[in-house]
């Protein structure tokens, strides 16, 4: 699939991003894809291209654009468990700086850019997030329920926290259909219970599954956490979710 490098105007400057666009021409439903903590890199291009091959325009922003263009830090081709601590030591200040305020300032810019592209059909979009990107996807969907019809998160982080604005507390504003694919150990039973209770109470059309034999990061082939079977399982959930919610608009 063609990969196009883009700049997205935001309230704080300009975010570098890329889009994977179906090569069939015409207009396609839009999907905003939030990366994991490691950020924009070839692995995310592969994910976006795979999704674009199924007929979606996929926009992937550099979450850390305030600190420079992607890659903001130098990443190895394979993020093994040996190098993971040193990589996270560099990433953690960027993650901490990406506050809820910044997430909510950026989300409307990303959605506005996505929905106004000539290759994107009218109507709501899907939002997909990996790792911490799942929390960004949840915040985007709850802040803009009129624009987001599908929400998916895989090996999610930070969905249930002790903060007064924890993403799970915002679920009453959620109207999108939801699938969450957890790795084993991603959430404590207590946190998972809070999340499911919030979704049930709000009447959200959702599914949550703990993917068997997985560890956090299972979809990312450039890490030791990669699990091919679980990654295929994630596509088996994501594609029908998007087809049901976006293809009808």
Image (cartoon, helix red, strand yellow):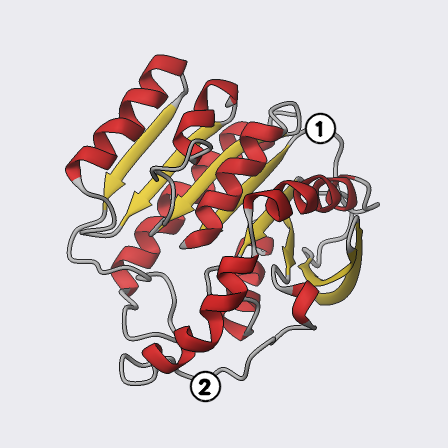
Q: Is residue 21 left or right of residue 31?
A: right
Q: Is residue 1 visible?
A: no
Closest to the observer: 52 or 147? Answer: 147
User: Residue 19 in the image: x percent, y percent?
Assistant: 69, 59
Quadrant position of residue 149: top right
Q: Position of residue 27 (x, y in %)?
A: 76, 43
Which corner quadrant holds the C terminus?
top right
Answer left or right for 126 relative to 119: left
Residue indicated by mark 2: 76
Visible residue check, residue 101: yes
Q: What residue is drawn where x is 76% and y is 31%?
A: 122
* Image vertical order of residue 115 relative to residue 156, above or below: above
Residue 53 lies in what quarter of the image?
bottom right
Counting residues from the N terminus, which is met first, the one under dot 2 or under dot 1? Answer: 2
Foreground residue among 81 and 59: 81
In the drawing, does residue 109 fall left or right of residue 81?
right
- Residue that mark 1 sits on: 123
Give neighbour class at mark 1: few <14, some 14-19, many 20+ (Cα, 10 Å). some
* Label 2 to label 1: alpha-carbon separation: 39 Å
Residue 96, label in figure: none
Q: How many marks?
A: 2
Residues packed near mark 2 inside 10 Å, few (<14), some (14 to 19) or many (20 plus)? few
Q: Residue at x 55, y 41 (%)?
A: 127
Measured from the top left, where is residue 152 in percent x and y? Answer: 44, 41
């Amino acid at each position: 699939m063609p990969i196009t490098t883009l700049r997205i105007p935001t309230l704080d400057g300009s975010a570098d991003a890329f889009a994977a666009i179906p090569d069939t021409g015409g207009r396609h439903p839009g999907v905003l894809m939030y990366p994991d903590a490691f950020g924009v890199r070839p692995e995310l291009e592969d994910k976006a291209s795979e999704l674009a091959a199924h007929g979606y325009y996929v926009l992937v922003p550099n979450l850390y654009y305030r600190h420079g263009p992607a890659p903001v830090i130098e990443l190895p081709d394979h993020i093994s468990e040996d190098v993971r601590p040193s990589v996270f030591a560099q990433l953690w200040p960027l993650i901490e700086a990406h506050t809820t305020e910044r997430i909510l300032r950026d989300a409307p810019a990303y959605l506005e850019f996505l929905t106004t592209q000539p290759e994107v059909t009218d109507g709501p979009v899907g939002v997909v997030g990996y790792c911490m990107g799942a929390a960004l996807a949840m915040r985007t969907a709850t802040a803009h329920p009129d624009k987001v019809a599908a929400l998916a998160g895989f090996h999610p982080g930070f969905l249930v926290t002790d903060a007064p604005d924890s993403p799970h507390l915002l679920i009453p504003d959620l109207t999108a259909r939801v699938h969450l694919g957890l790795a084993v150990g991603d959430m404590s039973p207590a946190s998972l219970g809070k999340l499911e209770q919030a979704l049930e109470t709000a009447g959200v059309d959702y599914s949550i599954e703990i993917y068997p034999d997985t560890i956090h990061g299972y979809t990312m082939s450039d890490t030791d956490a990669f699990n091919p079977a679980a990654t295929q399982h994630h596509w088996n959930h994501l594609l029908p979710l998007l087809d049901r919610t976006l293809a009808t608009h």
